[in-house]
Image: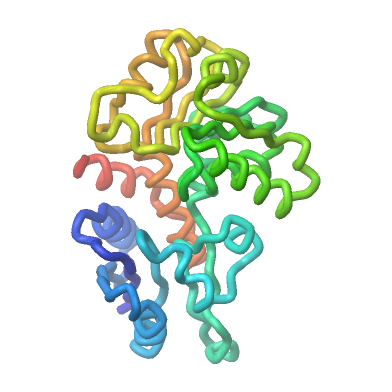
Amino acid sequence: MDVFGLLGNPVGHSLSPPMHEAAYDELGMDARYVTFEPAPDDLGAAIDGARALGVAGLNVTIPFKEAALPHVEADDLAARIGAVNTIDFPDGDAADDAPTGHNTDAAGVRRSFAHHDVTLAERDAVVVGAGGAARAAAFALADAGAAVHVANRTVERAERLVADVGRETPDVSERVTSGGLDSLGTRVSDADVVINATSVGMEEDRSPVPSDALHADLAVLDAVYRPLDTRLLRDARERGATTIDGAWMLLYQGVEAFERWTGRDAPVDAMNEALRARL
């Protein structure tokens, strides 16, 4: 039996186990997905222990995504983003090599838009926020050929993110800009794509984006998935925009991890059904 798992602290709330186990059931795989909750100082030992026990692959969540970097050989995208959420363990002749770290959150962004027939190349995009989800979104958009504006309450954090994207992806440095929230309405009015990468809308029924800036030519992704139907998405839908709830991003980062681990096409519909049944 193959064992896959999730490293985080806490992990009791995670929706990854039912999503991945639905994939194993759909494909008739002899596999299980389990959660691990190491102490913050024990992350390296946990990764080594998983490898020694023959765990086939790991996801990594808060608070370990950045801390995992020294313990893996990060691929190009994970190294540029500065965070790992998926780990591959080599086998065969490469069994003694370092595990490989990936960031599938960026793929979760790209594949969410693709699922809704939204093209990102040569589009003007606005990312609200400058934390971990915003980093994945900004790199995903820039790599896809979009012009990206990062808006954040603390302008300095937005500037640092944009500097990172420009430094790590020099050919897009002229297409990434930053600013505060005071000009967000103007930016959104002229944009093609908006991503809320903050927690606004999770605890309160409010939106980080002025509703009068939304328009029918927008595609709006809200990374919040509890609740699924946030104030931002309702406002955007009323304006005729394409709306994408946060469960799609969660789904497709898991789909990407599954496909990296197994080399098989993920049963997306089964995984999506299992995920949404628990939201």
As rendered, which of 28 and 245 lies closer to the eye?
Answer: 245
**Image spot of residue 96 (x, y percent):** 55, 91
Q: Is residue 207 above or below residue 9?
A: above
Q: Residue at x 66, y 63 (%)?
A: 76
Residue occupying image coordinates x 37% and y 85%: 45
Q: Is residue 213 above or below residue 165?
A: above
Which quarter of the image is occupied by the N terminus?
bottom left
Say above or below: 176 vs 105.
Answer: above
Q: Quadrant of the C terminus?
A: top left
Q: Tell how many labels.
A: 0
Name the image colouring. Answer: rainbow
The quadrant in which residue 49 appears is bottom left
The picture places residue 130, in percent across and down from the top left corner, at 50, 42
Residue 169 location, x and y as percent? 73, 50
In the picture, residue 140 is in which quadrant? top right
Image location (x, y in percent) of residue 38: 28, 75
Q: Nearer the viewer, residue 265 or 195?
A: 195
Q: Residue at x 30, y 22 (%)?
A: 206
The residue that appears at 47% across and 46% down in the rendered structure is 131
Is 142 on the left-hand or right-hand side of 103? Answer: right
Relative to 224, is 236 above or below?
Answer: above
